[in-house]
Each structure stands twice: as C-alpha cells, then as structure tokens.
Image (cartoon, rainbow, N blue to C red):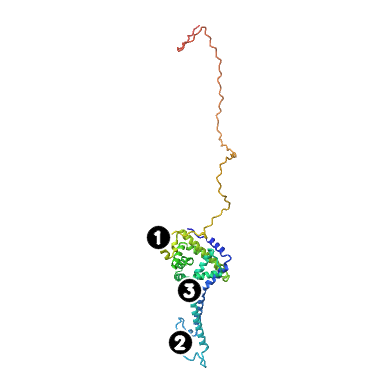
Amino acid sequence: MMKINRAVVKQQAKDIIKGNVFKLFLITLIIGVLTGGGMTFSNTNIGGLDDILDRNPFSQNQDDNDSYDFDEFTTEFSDPFQGFDGNGKVSPVVAGVGVLAGVGALAAFWGFIISAASLLLSPLKIMLDGLFWQLIKGNNMGLGDGLGFIFKKTFDKNYLQKFLLELVQGLLLGLLYLLFIIPGIIFTYKWYFTSYILAEHPELSFDQAMNISKKMTNNHKGELFVLDLSFIGWFLLLIPTIGLAGIYVTPYYETTKALYYENFKIRAFQEGAITQYDFMTNEQKIAAGQAAPQMNTYAPAPQETYYVPAQEPVPQNNYYVPAEQPAPQPVAEPVVEAAPQPVVEPAVEPVSETVAEPAVEPVAEPQEAAPSPEYYTPTAPEQETPQTPETTEE
C-alpha cells in the first residue's frame, strides 16, 4: 500500500505559495470572518447579556437555584412610589434597568442575525477550499478575482447542496464530538475531502460527496491524522507571535491539504477504490443506461499530467554509476606467476638405518684348460641324441 510522501507534498506547497502568501491570507481571513468570526462575536455578546441580567435589581433576591420567591418580590416592591422621586419622575435605578434590558434585547437580536448570516454563508468555506484546489492546478487568481470566484461559485444553482453539506456534516460531527470523542475524530477524517469534491464537482449531491470522501480515505485516515499533527508546531507559533504567524501558516496549511486531496484522488483511482461512476449524477447514470453494479468496472479516469503521486525517494548512491556498456571481448591476460611460497619440510624423525655391507663379488678362479683329446670326435648328426664319449683310460 503506497503512502503519500508528506515531506515532498509540503515542499511542493511551499513552492506554490511563494509570492502569494499575503494575498491568500487576506482571502482566507475575509471568508473566515464571514463564516465563523461573527458567530464567535455573537456568543460573546450573549454571555455579556447574561452577566448584565444577573446583576439587575430584579434578581438580587434570588436564591442559589435562580428561582423567584413571590413573597420577596412583592415585599421588595410593595411601595408603589419606591421607584419614583417626589416630582413623579422615574428614578435613575429603574431607568438604568430599562436601558440595560433594551441593550440586552438588541444584543440578542444582533447575535441571532449574525449567527443566521454565518450559517447561510457557511458554503463559502467550500469554495475557499476550491480556490486552493484551483491554485495547485495552476490557476493563480488575484485578490479580487479570488473573492469573486468564491462568491460566484457559492451562490450558483448548486448552492443548496453546499449548504446541506455544511449543515448536515456540522450537526453530525458536533453530535459525535459531544457524545463520543473518538468516533468524532474518525468521522472527521472520513469526510476530510467533502468540500474539495463538491467544489470540483458542484453537480453532485452532498451525500455523494460524503460517500466519495469515505472511499478515498478508507484505510488512509492515519495519514491525514499525521498530516495535521505535523502542523502543531506551526499552530503553536501563533501564540508567541500574537497570530502574525498565521499570515504564512494559513496558506501553507490550506495548500498542503489541497495537494493531499489531489494525491488521494489519483491513488484511489489507481487502486480502484473509486471510479468515474462515483462522480456521475443520477441523470448521467440514467442517460448512460447502465445500472450501478455494472458500472463498478468503469474505466478509471485518465492519469493527469499535472501531479504524480509522491513516492518514497530513491536512495542515492555515494558513488557514480556509469551507463551500462557492452560486454568487452575476452582478452588474454598475462599469466602472473605466483610468488614462491616457502616450502616447509616435514620433520623427519631419525630412523636407525641398517648399514649395508659391501657386496663381495666372487673372484673367478682360474680353470685349467680341458685336455685336448687325442682323437677326433665327429659332430653328432641332427635330431639325434648326442652320445657321451667314453673316457679312455690311459
């Protein structure tokens, strides 16, 4: 299972935002104020109103359970002229209470208006992610063009689907975080790319975007969790810099997430987790004339030439590897004589040798010449047994 090389993607994000940091920060800040800053302000006002009401004269005789005692209330204001001066005018205390009540009601109404506006403008956050996706695709817009793109694409005919995505996803995640922290974290990363999907394919419904994001992040949620953890140091830098570090951190973080979306989408196509069928509307499916089970083998989208999924870098050798050359013909090499090795003579144990006496050759004794016979002895005929001559005695 191939993983995204986080270091490579983050370096690409740094390269993309060069020269555009301040512009991207301003766009993000404006959209953030319109979609989230107003809600925070309204909550603060409501809290201040509660403090004001807790200190008004009508609540000073309340017990710890904030329950009114009718007897105390009637006793406290039994004198019909207690709140008036001698000339029949309202005392400053009563007048102050009325002013505070009016200010509190106005603040509550203003908080409601801001909260409702923030909710209606919440789809702007989807197209803000779409702006960063356009950036990594090479469409670098100026400040005015960027804001115009966000507003124009938000309030088009597909506004309702963007609004429902923000509403439904926000309610579900809020409920999960309220009841169970861990499931809330899991579903956060399961729907991590819903805004990018709907920004790229505005014709889809919000539930299709949630389903596609679930398929893309299946078995890869840990990568997204580690990605967010890698930015903790940058986020902590906002504290000592009083938020000024956000000028760089915000565009850097948003661009990295957009690159991760592009990586995850390409990998999901390559692994078969998603197909072109997932990005078809119901009308397109009907027009295609094919049912969902038959479309699961739909050919994946062609590989885009812009971005290649980041892979682990190939380890570089510390030495130069020349190009492969054709095998040379064998050449007779001169025979190199081996250096003579010292011969170690085996130890010979002394053996008692038998001294051989010199052989004495027998001395030929002189023989006397045979006496010559006095008569002739004829030669014996062939093939006849020779006869021994008889000795003649003298």
Is label 2 or label 1 in front? 1
Viewer-closest of 98 and 60? 98
Q: How many labels does the image show?
A: 3
Q: How crowded is mark 1: few (under 14 residues within 10 Å), some or many (20 or more)?
A: few
In the rendered view, would you say 246 is above or below 386?
below
At label 3, the amino acid type is: Leu
Q: Residue under label 2, please give it.
A: 73
The single residue placed furthest to the bottom in the displayed view is 87
> Can residue 73 be seen here?
yes
Upstream in sequence: badge 1 or badge 3: 3
x, y percentage for residue 233? 55, 66
What is the C-alpha distance between the residues marked 2 and 1? Answer: 75 Å
Q: Residue under label 1, please give it.
A: 294
- CB atoms at circles 2 and 1 under 8 Å apart? no
Upstream in sequence: badge 2 or badge 1: 2
Q: Residue under label 3, please give it.
A: 120
In the rendered view, would you say 177 is above or below 310?
below
